[in-house]
Image (tube, rainbow, N blue to C red):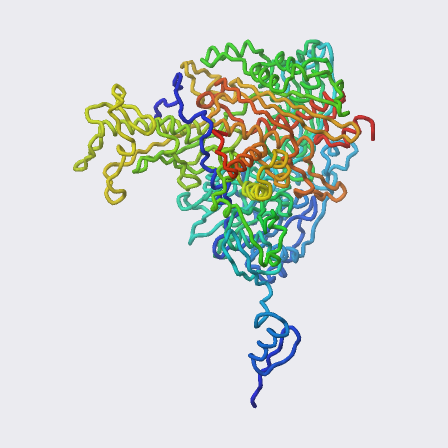
Amino acid sequence: MSTQSKYVCPYCATTFDAFDGLKAHVVDEHGTMPLPRPHGLINLSVNGQRYELQVEPNTTLYNLIHDQMGLTGVKMFCDRGACGSCTVIMDGRPVLSCMTLAIECDGKTIETAEGIAAAKHPLIETYVKHHAMQCGYCTPGFVVTAKALLDKNPDPTEEEIREALSGNLCRCGTYPQHPKAVAEAAKILQGGAADERA
Amino acid sequence: MKEPDLDYEIKDQEFSAIGKRGIRRLDGYEKASGCAIYAADIKLPGMLYARILASPHPNARIRSMDTASVEAFSGVRAILRYDDPEIEEKVVPGSYGAPWYVLTGCASWEGEPVGLVVVGESTQICDEALKLAKVEWEIFPHVIDEEDVLKPDAVTLHDKVPNEIFDSSNVNNPYASAFSGVFRIAEGRNIFQKGDVEKGFAEADKVIEFPARRYWHTWAEPELPSALCRWNGGYPELWIKHQHVYEHKQVMSYWFDMPMNKITTHAPYQGAMFGGWNWMNWSTITHYITALLSKRTGRPVKLVFNRRDDFYGGALDCAVHHFKVGAKKDGTITAVSIRSVFANGPKAWEPHMGIGHFLENSCVHNLYKENYAGVVNKGPVTAVRCEQLPNTFCFNMVFSHVAAELGLDPTEVALRNDGYEGKDTAYLAEFKRHYGKPERDSLRECIEAGKKAINWDEKWHLPGTEKLPNGKMHGIGFGWTHEWNSKRGSGSVGLLFEPDGSVSLLAQRSDVGLVAETAYCQIAADELGMRYEDVVLRPHKDTGFALMTPDGSCNLCTNGWVVRRAARKARQELLEFAANGYQEKTLSSPPAFPGYQPEDLDVKNSVIYVKKDPSVQKPVKDVVREVQCVQWWSHPQIFARGWKQAGSWTDPTGKASEQLVDYSKRPHLCRQAHFMEVEVDTETGQIEITKVVNANDVGKAINPEAVEGQQYGGTFMAASRGQTEEVIWDKGTGVMLNGNLLDYKIATILDCGPIEPIIVETALGYGPYGANGIGEDVADLVASLLGPAVFNALGVAVDDFPITPDKILKALGKI
């Protein structure tokens, strides 16, 4: 007994005898490429590199960046959106990667501390110079938040810097050094020279 | 084996790295760029995860446990039960080497790791599987408030359960919980007395009595604890978040009865370590568990703790105190008596806990301390930056109350009572003269510098007398104590000239962010005559050289000696090689400076030169260069080893006495003075810290930015310790209510006003160059400085920490 395969449209359940028929149907009727994209497939740019990745629905952006991409600049500190250590810049805004599902990041552009360092952003050197770190665990989160601030506000006041960084926790208490580092990076970005010393 | 004397101080020694600002820190780029690796970041091929069952009850024992469903859960690869034959009754060394069980079926607080470990493909799988364990619990009554334990009519734990349940020091006790801290939970009382307090009270013009309390707080370190082991075909390889990495190699050797040289340990960067987790026995024993389970599964196993897991453990100062103090009108303190009830602590050590700084730091003759340990079902307490918290707390309380009650300037009261073990500053001056220490008055220098910075003479006022134009009350507080600590620790390091003339310090360290490795390189560079840029510490390598860990602020005061000894030895070897070359049978490496003796030569800026004719010179790299590394060495590499046990202070005058040999008795010579300004809103009870000044006599600042980092950081930690940090339990159920960083508030950048760090350098410390530690003083003392500042603002004492707005309003009679 011979059997006849049927091809079923995943959107409207219309059946076709040939695959080409189904292909033409989904393009014409549903406006998509031949077949729907598999659930969980996302495209995103991280530090200028394009990725096409299959992610689980419960994968957070933190898990994706830290565990799968191996970018250790995102850190798990509070475990629930209270500390800012896992901050990344997504389409220009600082977001908490531990509170963001990877599956929602399709089409997004993301920057991490590693990308900021690779681009030789002056924040990295001013953070080193001003000792804006102790154990360093929360430091990349601060650098990312500060970068997002300077992208939007190239000449922030000390009060604006403190306000911008107020969502980042540092248990070592390095806070007073951060405004100095951010202000000097702002100055360098505006064409000024680095200060003589810390 | 006799070491040459390498600990001499060089008069007017010139430095190009030590004490200089702008030295580039070694760890800076890695940490800022996100490239620094911590144990929490490490993921190995095929790695499994492990989680431990958390007790749902504050005081309970497992009667029976059915784990069939746990083992059957998809993704579970192994389990370890408390009654597993390999670990049942097994006692192993925990922190401090104290013997302890691996895993038991008893829990002394809600959340205690107990009874069952699950290994699976993910932490989620482990957590889900743990829910399937069918446990029949035998539940005992619990107590949450330490004072309740001592009430005559209290339902004491002893009424309900066998007395032995509390004696965790008995390792054969079937009720002992496996994970209690090194400071074992046990009830008891300790009394310390010196002089005659009743006589002191009789001599006083005024006797003051008052209570004070410090509620439970914890470490909240940023990197979540973990233990990772890969069993390498017979031997364990470990990645360790711990201050004492090398000790893990030692205890692993004991646990598995294998030689230490077969065991590999890695010490990545540590996401902060304030004691705390480090002193919990489970910080060590979990490595045994992961090693055992890695061996059984044939895959790497990482045991991970979540944020709530890491909240169970408190600081040593969680206590209620009742003070009685006698003083004369001029502020001379005649007697101090303190009765304290400590939560879960510290029965077994330091009976003078809480009154120690009066002994070490004052001329007060008559002291009495009565310490009770109240056993509560909250978890162990331990040193959380640091064990001196009860001492600084009580010291601050007494001085602020004496000054306020007598209407005196607290800085004058401090100067009047400065001293050592009941002796006044004349004794200290004589001691300094006798031992060739600089004759400087450290407390007076710190106070003068601090007063100037905070404008004390204009701003200080009597308590409750200064209302600001904004309607708030202005307060200004002052606290003081002695230096930290330099009395313990030992370390070793190797120093190697690489064939290109660069210098590697070889050691395993534990980096918790103190800029310590940079400071070691500064010392090595100046002692060798090398440029700082040419010296690097090879961090966390499993070399067998173990540096002193960042404990008790003894890090640099130990390792500074160690590195200096190694550098001085290596420098001598370098100059001998430059003058004499190397000969061995047919192998000959000619001298770089023929015709000269080693003593004719010197090194500066990484160049060797002839002292009498500096134009005759050669870069170190050209002197030590090898023709071809490994394949054809032309001479052995220049290498030296340094070792030192801290506390063995070298007497520069050669007058070493018994007092110095017993280093615990040598007097503290450096002082620390802290000032805090606040505004208190009497309508809302809100406190704003508007300025803090830290004047620290660190003896000698090897790396000034590192010192300032500790001053800033300690102040911010203290700001939230004073105002917000409190772990809260439900008394009825014994369940912790705020084990997360949303509900347990640590300071943000907005929670403290400007901080002015002042570095005083008297060279009176016992470390190299007269240095001493800075890591703990600020966070300890400033934490309770909020009390004196608020007292000064309101004229009413609110010494109930954390001082929250509701307590202010209650003290003002508004609620």
For the residue pair B317 and A53, the one nearer the viewer reads as A53
Quarter of the image for the C terminus of chain B: give it.
top right
Residue at coordinates 39% horizontally, 44% vertically from top-left?
Answer: B261
Q: Residue furthest left?
A: B586
Q: Residue furthest bottom?
A: A1
Q: Taking B67 as reference, is B401 left or right?
A: right
Residue at coordinates 75% horizontally, 44% vertically from top-left?
Answer: B733
For the residue pair B192 and A172, the one nearer the viewer reads as A172
Q: Taking B17 as reference, is B574 left or right?
A: left
Classify B89 as above or below A33. Answer: above
Relative image position of residue A188 (x, y in whole percent): 50, 37
Q: Residue furthest front?
A: A191
Q: Is residue B298 visible?
A: yes
Classify B308 as above or below A3. Answer: above
Residue at coordinates 37% horizontally, 23% vertically from top-left?
Answer: B6
Quarter of the image for the N terminus of chain B: give it.
top left
Q: Is residue B171 visible?
A: no
Q: Quadrant of residue B568?
A: top left
Classify B199 as above or below B295. Answer: above
Tally of marks:
0
For the residue pair B135 and B421, the one nearer the viewer reads as B421
Q: Quadrant of residue B755?
A: top right
Relative image position of residue B670 (x, y in whole percent): 53, 19
